[in-house]
Image (cartoon, helix red, strand yellow):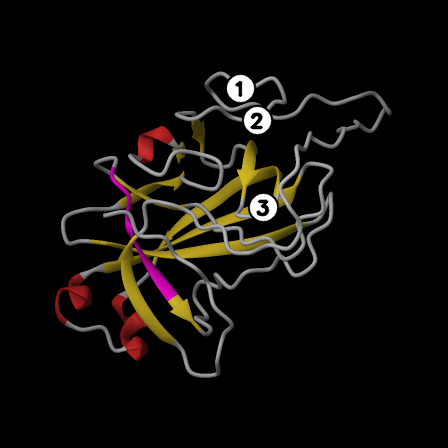
Amino acid sequence: MITRIRRLPAPRAASLLLLFTLVGCGADDGAGPSADKPAPRVSASGSPESSPSPTSSVNEDGTAKAGTKAKLGEPTLLSYEGATKAGILEVTVTGIEKGSKEDVAPLGLKGDAKKMTPYYVRSTIKNAGENDLSHAAVDPPGGLLDDGTAARQLLLIGTFAPCDSYPKTKSFPPGASYETCAPVFADPGTEVTGAVWTGQGYPDFPPSSGVTWTP
């Protein structure tokens, strides 16, 4: 079963849910969807600069097609589709950090969850189009396990200091960018080695049908 995650306003005390994250979510965003195109990129000399391209083919507007495989650290243009807003995002997965069980000990994990290892998928997301995406529900890239499946994602209602995943799109006009993080888990014997973007304009499943980033 595909599980969609919706981030909710954060109370003071953090609570959590462990879910298989195979899709992104689009909550009510405000204005209706409309077509978008990348904002022009200009080099220091004043001439147009080509948009960064992933390793596979791209759409006419420069965005990555479903199934694109990019490299960690490579800026990748994505066609974003939320419930009521659409646009173009430039997503850069800046790092994948292995956490420790001590990081999540205060969260009171139970059962098999206590055996899992947390990882933090860090990325920068930029509004690279011409549409205002303020208040859009943009889920960050999730984790990709070494076997090509999606990592379990930790859904937090509240704050989690090692990996701040709280949405930062209250004001997200063209050209704006922000840093974000997705806390994910790896079962014993597996590792998070890449990142994945599914849903939000791309197929929900399997992970390989979205956009992936690997070393």
Q: Secondary structure at mark 1?
A: loop
| Gap in angstroms between the C-alphas marked 2 and 3 | 14 Å
Crowd band around label 3 with a 10 angstrom C-alpha radius: few (<14), some (14–19), many (20+): many
Residue 36: x and y, percent?
Answer: 67, 33
Identify the residue shown where x is 69% and y is 36%.
129
Which is nearer the eye, 162 or 19?
19
| Amino acid marked by disc 1 | Val
In magenta stretch: residue 109: no
Crowd band around label 1 with a 10 angstrom C-alpha radius: few (<14), some (14–19), many (20+): some
Identify the residue shown where x is 21% and y is 36%.
147
In the rendered image, which quarter is residue 184 located in? bottom left
Viewer-nearest of discs 2 and 3: 2
Which residue is disc 2 drawn over? 63
| Gap in angstroms between the C-alphas marked 1 and 3 | 19 Å
Check the image and report above or below for 57 versus 105.
above
Residue 52: x and y, percent?
Answer: 61, 26
Q: Are marks 1 and 2 in contact (CB under 8 Å)?
A: yes
Residue 169: x and y, percent?
Answer: 62, 57
| Amino acid marked by disc 3 | Ile
Residue 167: x and y, percent?
Answer: 55, 60
Which residue is disc 3 drawn over? 125
Which residue is disc 1 drawn over? 58
Residue range in magenta is 149-155
Residue lying farthest to the bottom in this orientation: 12
Which is nearer the eye, 164 or 134?
134
Question: Where is the C terminus found, in terms of image quarters?
Answer: top left
Check the image and report above or below for 166 versus 64.
below
Identify the residue shown where x is 25% and y is 39%.
149
